[in-house]
Image (cartoon, coloured by chain):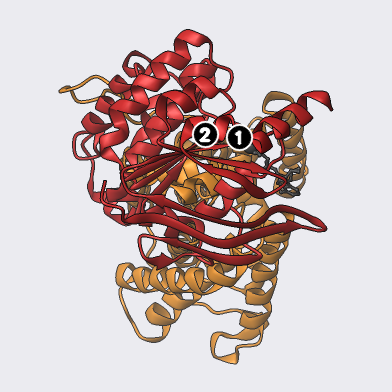
Amino acid sequence: MTGRIVAGLEGVAKAFGGLRAVDGVSLDIPAGEVVGIIGPNGAGKTVLINLITGFYHASDGQITIADHNVTQWTLHQIGRLGVARTFQNIRLFRRLSVLENVMVANPAFTAHPLRGLLALSPRRQGRDEAMDLLALFGLADRADQSAGELAYGDARRLEIARALATRPRLLLLDEPAAGMNDRETEALVDDIRKVKPRLEAIALIEHDMSLIRALADRVVAMNYGRIIAEGATGTVLSHPKVVEAYLGQEES
Amino acid sequence: MIANLLSTENIVFTGVNILLAWSVYLTLMTGTLSFAMAAFMGIGAYVSGILTAKFGWPLVPAALVGTLACLAGGILVGFPALRVRGLYLMLVTTGVTLVVKVAIENIEYVGGVGGMGGLRGTTPELVLASVVVIGGALWLLSRTPLQRIMDAAREDENVAASLGINIVFIRVAGFAAGAALAGYAGALYGHYIIFIAPEQFDILYSVFIALYVVLGGVNNLWGPVLGAVVITMLPEVVREFGVMSSGFRSARQLIFAGALVLLLLVRPAGILAFRRLSIRAGRGRVPVGST
Ligand SMILES: Nc1ncnc2c1ncn2[C@@H]1O[C@H](COP(=O)(O)OP(=O)(O)OP(=O)(O)O)[C@@H](O)[C@H]1O
Ligand SMILES: [Mg+2]
């Protein structure tokens, strides 16, 4: 752990009309850490990820990634800086094959598309690296299938493989275990541990607390767009405000 | 009968229309259905025509200059035009065709509304060779990472952008490449019919070209070829077999109406039903054929 900050948010806010979905969030994601982000439905977790990755632009505050102020950067600029993500509602390229979904993320070609014109052999197109990633996630034998045909758990893992193919410094996972059974969730924990050394940091949104306990070095709890508790995993999970936020959700 | 179908005129027109269909295909690959092809055809024909008819250039270099002019024009128009999407983009590209036509009508140097003559040099051999070379290039393209990037960007442009792909660049590149190809086809066309006039590069031609692609489908580069061949040849076939005596124009109209109905029946998914697999998983072996 170096203590270096991979991503830093300062008073970041995002309003949709009158709704402040993210309301003044300040947060550092240090190198070497897995930061868990929890909170009841509608707390603003996904919006936060959308702000860091450039899907939304902050109405207020500043986002710094690898010492660049990226607050107003476009999607592809932030992507090239080394931020990759998965989606709560899986967004694969369904018409491409499983293998193609990973190959398309190869930074050698995403950053210089015309260079792709000269890469005619699958080997030069990075097929072998892509197959390695698929193998890591147990998807190698589905490589030629179209991504739209994948089962839920496979699709989630393919999204992680695609994100890793961009060789990111920061990986943001939005409920990677959603829809997975216990066995798949356990396998996912192993997979994320395996890929952790390839990354500077991971932010992990999850409702499944077993996953948070297994992976997070530190947890940030949100409600109504704000951070309500932050710190060591055990402390945050038993924090009265956090317990109350989740109880409130169950009652409504 | 068959001999008539393979007349010089049919070969040239079919070949030119295949090139035009591919120009729409290229543009559509990056998510833009363009009705600007007649405009770029016109620019290609006029620029190359000036060079051959007024300056005595040979056809091929003149055609290439016409192609480059359209590439530049495509980039120039592409940047502002591709900010809008869907129906608006169709309107904008339609506008391009209208504006270019009016512009040519007002340039006295190239004869204005009256047109310009003396364009010669397109042979069936040149057209066929062009179709083979450009078809080969498109086939190679379909096996490159660039093709995969375009497919991904078309399916979900925000996710593609998030992977680091500059969507604006991809869309402008596709638009400009399509424009260049239409310009080249226009040069070949102009130098076959000898005399060109603005009315030949009308918006209707843009619609016809788009229809080749709509009819043939865009799953791979053969779909547009099929569409172009069928629509170009059918009026001839119909005439050959005497079904239709009232001539070329009404036959065309009937066929277009029929083609549209057929399209809606057979291909309700329409023009955006892409599917191909360029790379397979097997390691160490050269992948065979795409779907
Ligand atoms: N594009 C949008 N337009 C308007 N409101 C939005 C938009 N995106 C999110 N919201 C609202 O912002 C709030 C926070 O949503 P967000 O998706 O971040 O919640 P979340 O914490 O990810 O919840 P969940 O656990 O259910 O995924 C919600 O009230 C949501 O309805
Ligand atoms: Mg969410």
- Secondary structure beneath dot 1 equals loop
Q: Residue at x 57, y 23 (%)?
A: A178
Q: Is residue B7 visible?
A: no
Q: Splitting the image into four quadrants, where does ligand 1 fall? A: top right
Q: Position of residue A85 (x, y in %)?
A: 47, 41
Crowd band around label 2 with a 10 angstrom C-alpha radius: few (<14), some (14–19), many (20+): some
**Could you tell whether A113 is left or right of A232 in the image?**
left
What's the CA distance linking mark 2 and mark 1? 6 Å
Q: Nearer the viewer, residue A160 or B249?
A: A160
- Identify residue for label 2: A235
**In the image, residue B201 above or below residue B147:** below
Q: Position of residue B113 (x, y in %)?
A: 67, 81
Label 1 near label 2: C-beta < 8 Å?
yes
Where does the C terminus of chain B fall, quadrant-wise? top left
**Could you tell whether A207 is left or right of A101 in the image?**
right
Give the letter of the chain under mark 1.
A
Q: Position of residue A50 (x, y in %)?
A: 58, 49
- Secondary structure beneath dot 2 equals helix
Which residue in the rendered view is the most extreme toward the bottom?
A: B108
Spot the red chain and give its letter: A
Rendered hue of chain B is orange
Type of amino acid at the residue the image marks with label 1: His
Q: Give the number of the disc on residue B187.
A: none
Q: Residue at x 47, y 49 (%)?
A: B162
Q: Quadrant of residue A69?
A: bottom left
- Identify residue for label 1: A239
Give the letter of the chain under mark 2.
A
